[in-house]
Image (cartoon, rainbow, N blue to C red):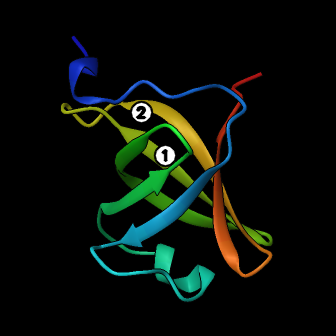
Amino acid sequence: MSNRSRVDPVSSGTCYLVTTIENRPPERLDDFVMDDVVTLTVASAHQVVTIEGSSRLDGDSILVYEKDGDGKDVRTWRIKQQHGRFEAYERSMY
């Protein structure tokens, strides 16, 4: 059984700004690509969320597959560098 209680709820369609990756500000997209689990913090005007998961480069963006406490995928985030900042959006499964 998946432990979704360790996963923060998020607002659909909301832009979240990436504030940290592995406890430091991101500088380039390559900062997000790691062999191990990546931990990042994203923030909207109303919420701060910590995301843990696996990541991969997907063209001009990064896909982060957020995991729950048991290692199961719960959602996917697309991260793009735009306007001098890193923006994260929950990617629809449909």
Residue ID for mark 1: 65
Spot the residue most to the top: 1
Badge 2: few (under 14), some or many (20 or more) residues near its Cα, within 10 Å?
some
- Give residue 72's position: percent from left, percent from top: 33, 31
Q: Residue at x 45, y 67 (%)?
A: 19
Q: How many marks?
A: 2
Badge 1: few (under 14), some or many (20 or more) residues near its Cα, within 10 Å?
many
Q: Is residue 72 above or below residue 77?
A: above
Identify which residue, 30 or 82, lies in the foreground.
82
Spot the residue most to the front: 45
Residue ID for mark 2: 73
Identified by mark 1, the residue type is: Tyr
Look at the numbered disc 1 and give the secondary structure of its residue.
Answer: strand
Q: CA distance from mark 1 to mark 2?
A: 6 Å
Q: Residue at x 80, y 76 (%)?
A: 83
Look at the numbered disc 2 and give the secondary structure of its residue.
Answer: strand
- The answer to whether residue 2 is left or right of residue 88 is left
